[in-house]
Amino acid sequence: MKVLVVGNGGREHALAWKLLQSQQVEQVVCVPGNGGTAKMANCQNLPLAVDDFDGISQYALANEISLVVVGPEVPLAKGITDYLQAQGLMGFGPVRAGAQIEASKTWAKSLMLEAGIPTAKAAVFTEATAAKSYIKAQGVPIVVKADGLAAGKGVTVATTREQAESAIDAIFQGQFGSAGEFVVIEECLIGQEVSVLALTDGLTIRPLLPAQDHKRVGEGDTGDNTGGMGAYAPAPIATPELMARVQTEVLEKAIATLRTKGIDYRGVLYAGLMITPAGDFKVLEFNCRFGDPETQVILPLLATPLVDLILACVQQRLEEMPPIAWHSGAAATVVAASGGYPGNYPKGKVITGINAAEAAGVKVFHAGTKLNNQQQIVTDGGRVLNVTGTGENFQQAIAQAYTGLKSIQFEGIYYRRDIGHRVLNEV
Ligand code: AMP
Ligand code: GLY
């Protein structure tokens, strides 16, 4: 089989890498891919935009591509799967109607209420005055969210009324474009977050190993929010008892309710949960895709061939599949970022030491990298590399990732030294 992967992050490098481990997969084409997918054996990049549906379809039809696996939410929300289906191609990822579960927070909220899925109390506003009076009545802390896709930047956890009010103003003044026509104001939940990614064929839904990521840029989980500075799996806070509850109280309810709306949701359903100190949970958000960087720690532990699971979802025969098999142990990834991220940062810095790091046992997934004219790997984004360790336990996995990082250099490299601090003392 030839498979096309849409996207250019660490998640897509991990998907391509894992797909190529399946016997059936001979070749992967990444659109547009990055320096890591350009260098990987049996993998090549195709320089098209992720929302160039016509270009992607034409290439797939002309090159015997059997399957298109979509990484990011934007093409899903724009209907890439519907488009591919109309061309007779197989796409992994929900159709446009299903992707609303991520693309519209108000839509997702109503679905959760209809399905009886536990979630934070919320109210929706279309103008600032009413939103501000609501905040005055509710008090702080409180969470202000733009309704639509905002590349992870549309949420403010406000600890003062001024912060909440300026978040409301920014959204209604168009900072997030059409994503900001509605504002969702939510009760602030306290606890630990966990990401439960599940595979579904629209009828059956099977969770992957739970993962946790570190969203803040600074050590001790301080400073600005980022796309994620590191992650680890399996997250011990998501006990088997909790996962059983998530299966029946969240995942199955969501799929059943999508079905009653006439939506045949096939792909990844990702539930972002807040686990309260008492061990209860609520859903913070749904995503319609694999998480980044969660995928980079989940896939190294997956023993079942990924392509078999993906095909079972697309062809609606997940129920017939044996239980998903996992390698024992743990995985952890540390993000090496460009100095200045999540603010401004330079690009084009030459990266060295990746081969030496991999020789020491880690897997380096590329995120913001590309090949320059001299075929050198250079930085091309804020989050540059996901240096991923595996081992019998978290101590080993995390130590391996940091050992690998010692070999890697580029000007301005920054990474957190405390990835996995929550689990290091527990296991
Ligand atoms: P979302 O895109 O809705 O998941 O929000 C992004 C991040 O904002 C989450 O991962 C949380 O860290 C935080 N967040 C969202 N909603 C809440 C909430 N109700 N209470 C506390 N933190 C939240
Ligand atoms: N790691 C968070 C996300 O993928 O949305």
Image (cartoon, grey):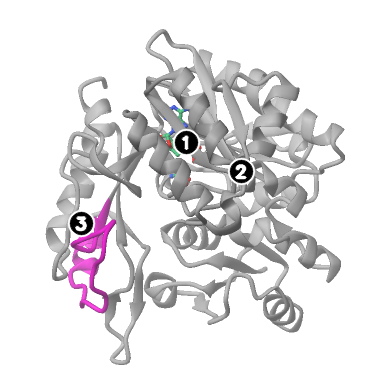
Q: Amino acid at mark 1?
A: Val
Query: Can you tell me whether the CB of the residue at mark 1 lies under 8 Å from the nearest atom of ligand 1?
Result: no
Q: CA distance from mark 1 to mark 3?
A: 44 Å
Q: Which quadrant holds residue 270? A: top right
Residue bearing the label numbered 1: 144
| Disc 1 residue crowd, few under 14, some 14–19, many 20+, Cα 10 Å | many
What secondary structure prevails in the magenta region?
loop
Q: Residue furthest top?
A: 278
Judge from the rendering whether residue 21 lies leftward or rightward of residue 4; answer left or right: left
Question: At which x and y percent is residue 199?
Answer: 64, 40
Q: Say above or below: 64 vs 297.
A: below
Judge from the rendering whether residue 129 lies leftward or rightward of residue 41; answer left or right: right
Secondary structure of the residue carrying tag 3 is loop
Q: CA distance from mark 1 to mark 2?
A: 11 Å
Judge from the rendering whether residue 142 lies leftward or rightward of residue 241; answer left or right: left
Q: Going 78% across and 29% down the picture, which residue do you hit? A: 257
Secondary structure of the residue carrying tag 1 is strand
Q: Amino acid at mark 3?
A: Ala
Q: Say above or below: 378 vs 397.
A: below
Residue bearing the label numbered 3: 360
Quadrant in the picture for the N terminus: bottom right
Q: Which quadrant holds residue 40? A: bottom left
Give me the disc on residue 182. Answer: 2
Given residues 51 and 7, the one toward you in this image is 51
Q: Nearer the viewer, mark 3 or mark 2?
A: 2
| Residue span colored magenta | 335-360
Given residues 189 and 377, the one toward you in this image is 189
Given residues 397 and 225, the one toward you in this image is 225
